[in-house]
Image: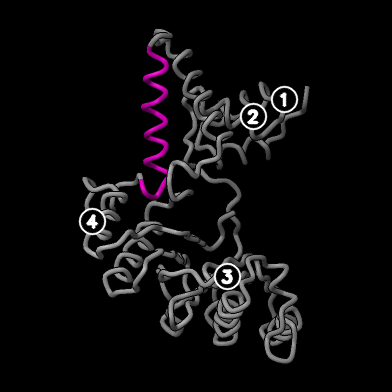
Amino acid sequence: MATITAQQVQKLRETSGAGMMDCKNALVEANGDFDKAIQLLREKGKASAAKKAGRTTSQGLVSAWISPDGSKAGVVEINCETDFVARTKDFLDFAQNLARLAAEKTVSSADKLLAEKLGAETVEQTLKGVIGKLGENIQVRKSFTLGGNGGKGVIENYVHAPVEKAPLCGSLAVILQVAADKNSDDVKSLARELCMQVAAANPKWISKEDVPADIVAKEKEIYKEQCRQSGKPEQAWGKITEGKLNDFYKQFCLLEQSYIRDSKTPINSLLKQASDKAGAPLAVKGFVRLKMGEE
């Protein structure tokens, strides 16, 4: 039997939101397997599927950039040691330059971005200079991009808690691409609204068809175990499981979510209304939601 440490119990508690003893018992039952312990807690109704693990304590910010024609976008997370440094002009300039470079070169990897040229030097060489000037350890943590493949449509962004001196830098950024034949103001407005939806509701996938089969299967297993433990008759498990799965889709799939400005309107209906107005089909092609400090 694996030895369960206080640190393991604390980590599981922070991740799941369950009580200390529930976490310890789950780890003992799972023989120290962290993921299995989370599943056990969920089966017993002690933890939420929406809890996230591994938040960092680093300071820093995220920065977004969109090309003038709205065809490509990049978003990066840059970490440092103090909020003071994160607000300096040198740090903000560095973050904004990296977001632009990521978009222009279509680099969706922090490691690959370090190897790209930023002017006469590589990003890694430039980073060393910024570290030397600001006197803090600085890391390029994440890099993501959208567009750049010549497809029709528009990309918009939303930045939460923007820095006054750099409005495309903040604590959270979303970039989202809508496929459309024509980039009208209405399409751009829709894309901006959907960016705010993603920022507020934090979906993981665009549609329920995008959810990996293994995740769906795992959710169904958990729901059936919940039914078993609660004493529900077995003939009712199928209907209950489908209902819970639909709730899962409504929480984590963008098109199934309720619109943040009108809870009675699902996003797929909002998209259809916009398509009818545009006279042509509109579709969400992709999105990236990047929050400072999240795994």
Depicted 120 relative to depicted 51: above or below: below
Q: In which quarter of the image is the C terminus?
A: bottom right
Instruction: Residue 223: give x, y in percent of width and height.
Output: 47, 23
Q: Which is closer to the viewer, label 1 or label 2?
A: 2
- Label ID, residue 293: none
| Label 1 packing within 10 angstroms: few (<14), some (14-19), many (20+) | some
Give the residue type that dot 3 points to. Val
* Residue 59 sits inside the magenta stretch: no
Residue shown at 56% from the left, 85% from the top:
93
Label 1's element? Answer: loop
Please give the label number shown on residue 36: 2
**Disc 3 from disc 4: Cα separation:** 33 Å
- Distance from disc 4 to disc 1, alpha carbons, whole Å, reads 52 Å
Dot placed on the residue nearer the N-terminal end, 3 or 4: 3
Residue receiving disc 1: 31
The CA span between labels 2 and 3 is 32 Å
Q: Which of marks 2 and 3 is nearer the N terminus?
A: 2
In 3D space, how far apart are the residues under numbered discs 4 and 2 (Cα atoms)?
Answer: 43 Å
Earlier in the chain: of badge 4 and badge 2, it is 2
Of marks 1 and 2, which one's residue comes earlier in the chain? Answer: 1
Which region shows up in magenta?
236-255
Q: What element carries label 4?
A: helix
Query: How many residues crowd around disc 4 within 10 Å: few (fewer than 14), some, or many (20 or more)?
Result: some
Residue type indicated by callout 1: Asn
Labelled pair 1, 3 in contact (Cβ < 8 Å): no
Please tell me the numbered disc located at residue 273. 4
Residue 76 disc label: 3
